[in-house]
Image (tube, rainbow, N blue to C red):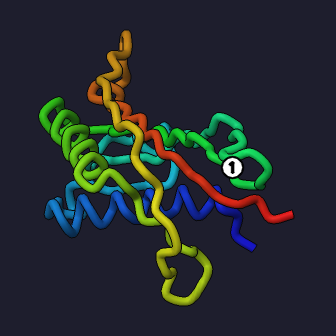
Amino acid sequence: MIQREDKVEQSVQDYLADQLFGVQGYPASLVEIIESFDGERFAKGLDKNYVAIGFNFDDGGREAECGSTLVRKLITIEMFIVATNATWGRNLKNAIQTAFEEDRAVPLKDIGEPGEPVFDALPVISCSGEHQPIPKPAPWQKFIWTIHLRLEDEYMVLV
C-alpha cells in the first residue's frame, strides 16, 4: 500500500521533471532531478546542475468541514538547486517557480497503480525561492538555491 504522502511527493517530482524536460526543454545532460540532497555526491565536483527534492513536511492537517472526515493539510516540499554557476542557479530557480505558478496545481497520480492515473489535483498555494549564501563554501556549495513549494491537500480520512 502506497501512502498518500508518498503519492504527493512522487507526483511533485514527476510533474517537475515533465515541466523542466518536456515543456521547458532543459537537457537532461545539463540538469538532473534527484530524490534527495546528497552532499557527498557533490563533493567530487559538479558535472551538471542538480535539483534535489529535500524535506517534505505538513501542518498536521485540520478538519475541513464540521461533522465529516474531510481533512485539509498544507504540505511544504523543499527543493535544493545545486548549480555549476550563478546563472544556472538563478535560471533553474526561476524555471521551477514558473512551472508551479503557471498551472497553479499539481496532478496527483495514483502511484503504484497501472498507468499511474491522475485521481486528484493539489492546488499550489505558493512557490518561493532564495539563494543560500554559505560562509567559506566548498566548491559545490557556491551556487545553491532553495525552493519552498506549498500545496494544499484535501481528502477524506477513511475510518
Q: Looking at the picture, tell me which residue is in the foreground, 47 or 112.
A: 112
For the point 68% across and 49% down, the residue is 71
Q: Looking at the picture, tell me which residue is in the foreground, 106 or 78.
A: 106
Assign a secondary structure to mark 1: strand
Up-down: is 132 above or below 12? above
For the point 61% across and 79% down, the residue is 112
Task: Tell me which amino acid carries mark 1.
Answer: Val
Q: Looking at the picture, tell me which residue is in the foreground, 76 or 31.
A: 76
**Viewed as shown, does residue 117 lie left or right of 49?**
right
For the point 62% across and 44% down, the residue is 73
Q: Residues within 10 Å of mark 1 (few under 14, many from 20)?
A: some
Quarter the N terminus occupies: bottom right
Report the residue marked by disc 1.
71
Up-down: is 36 above or below 109? above
**Tally of numbered discs:** 1
For the point 77% across and 55% down, the residue is 69
Q: Residue furthest right?
A: 159
Q: Position of residue 14 (x, y in %)?
A: 41, 65
**Viewed as shown, does residue 10 lie left or right of 81?**
right
Q: Residue furthest bottom?
A: 114
Up-down: is 106 above or below 146? below
Q: Position of residue 43 (x, y in %)?
A: 42, 37
Q: Residue furthest front?
A: 66
Quarter the C terminus occupies: bottom right
Q: Position of residue 109 (x, y in %)?
A: 51, 71
Q: Quadrant of residue 138?
A: top left
**Viewed as shown, does residue 6 lie left or right of 105?**
right
